[in-house]
Amino acid sequence: MTVDPDPPASPDATTVDRLAARHGAVRIVFVDGRFSAELSDSPSTPEATTPLPPGVRVGSLGGLVGPGESGLAELLGRWSAPRPEDFGRDDCFGVLNAGSASDPAVVTVNPGVAVGSPIHVLHLRTSGSDLGPTLSQPMTVIDVGSGASCRVIESHVSMGPGVTNAVTRIRAGVDSHLHHVRIQDDHADGAHVGDTVVEQHRGSYLKSISVNLGAGPSRNGIEVSLNGEHATAELSGLSLLTGTQRSDTVLNIAHRVPNCTSSQDFRSIVDDRARSSFCGHVLVAHGAVGTDSSQSNRNLLLARTAQADTRPWLEILADDVRCTHGATVGRLDDESLFYMRSRGIPGHKAESMLVGAFAAEVIDAVDPPSLRATLYGRIDRLDAGAHD
């Protein structure tokens, strides 16, 4: 596949709003891996009613890094190469992304700065001028300084067939707090490969939520390295799959030092002939005593032809740790459906309510409320009443 040599003009704001609604005080837009100043917010943008505090920078890497500001460039360069020492494998898609001409999206928060409103980073892949498939390789870099806190929404959408190879790199400084929501809603005729790598330092807290809605085949890779004591990572995810979609979630959590905590709650709702898979690897390194880790993968099949594969995996190389994991694959509970229908709730509504309840523990943690409402709306669109 090659990039369209004659790409179309940048989409207008109406198209962007249709593909990804507004959810943050400030939204920056990247089209085919390149920053779009016309579609991004500035301090004078009417929609950006809540200005960012001093010490927060958002935009493209090229526009933010200047003379004497080598921190982001160093961070990017260190992550651009394969890191086989982490989990014994090469990151070929990450290398491909690093070799592209894309301009990385950057969110940096200086030490001690608290950002009250979410920052929205939107990546859009266009369709080719001949309606053929296109390739986009966006990158997002989030760097939260010591004692700082922020919320970031990262959205991936597209206008036609093609491939998105997305990379996200996150560094959480000492005693920092980050709430990160990643939404994948690519075109149904497209493919999406996502790779998120996080390094956490002492006392840092990460709340990460990933939602997979679009694309035909998709892969959501997440690697978290707990490098400082008393770091906490709370990871959750939800995949809504219909038709012939295929979605793979590959999770790697590395407890490298003592007294860190991680939790994972990943769920999928699978309809028609779609298929989900989950592989979760938790590594407790030598000497990482006091580790507390829990992992859960739950899958709800809405049709007899739907499939779900799950592989929870603990690798414990230290004593005095607490680690649990569990996985389930099943259909809607017949007794619950009967109870609700016996009290006058129509069958279609009863099924929709149960599906919503299954997803609620993940969606209810999403912020802001407008994004939660959007996700519940996608669940309501599932035609539960048509299942056998």
Image: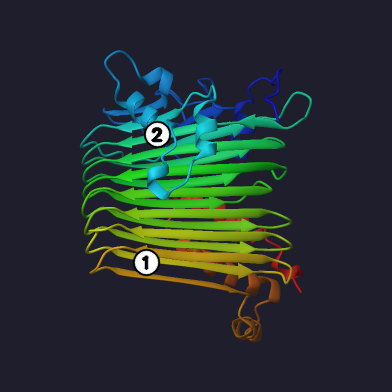
**Mark 1 secondary-structure assignment:** strand
Front-most of 344 and 112?
112
Q: Residues within 10 Å of mark 2 (few under 14, many from 20)?
A: some
Q: Which residue is mark 1?
A: 294
**Looking at the image, residue 42 lies above or below residue 339:** above
Q: Quadrant of the N terminus?
A: top right
Q: In the displayed image of the protein, which residue is found farthest to the top?
A: 67
Which is nearer the eye, 319 or 22? 319
**Are the residues flagged by discs 1 and 2 in contact, CB closer than 8 Å?**
no
Residue 100 position in % (x across, y down): 54, 25
Q: Position of residue 326 (x, y in %)?
A: 46, 72
Residue 284 location in percent, x, y? 32, 60
| Left or right: where 279 falls relative to 163 | left
Q: Nearer the viewer, residue 8 or 68?
A: 68
Q: Quadrant of the C terminus?
A: bottom right
- Secondary structure under badge 2? helix
Asked if residue 42 is positioned above or below residue 274 in the image, the reply reads: above
Q: Can residue 234 be seen here?
A: yes
Circle 1 residues within 10 Å: few <14, some 14–19, many ≥20: some
The quadrant where residue 247 appears:
bottom right
Q: Amino acid at mark 2?
A: Trp
Instruction: Tell me where residue 25 sits by quadrant.
Output: top left
Tell me the residue at 36%/58% (across/down): 283
First in residue order: circle 1 vs circle 2: 2
Q: Which residue does the image show at 52% across and 26% down from the upper left?
A: 99
Q: How is the image coloured?
A: rainbow
Instruction: Inspect the image, locate mark 1, and give the three-letter code of the amino acid beneath it.
Output: Ser
Can residue 23 be seen here? The reply is no
- The residue where tag 2 is placed is 79
Of tags 1 and 2, which is closer to the observer? 2
User: Against 197, is 69 above or below?
Assistant: above
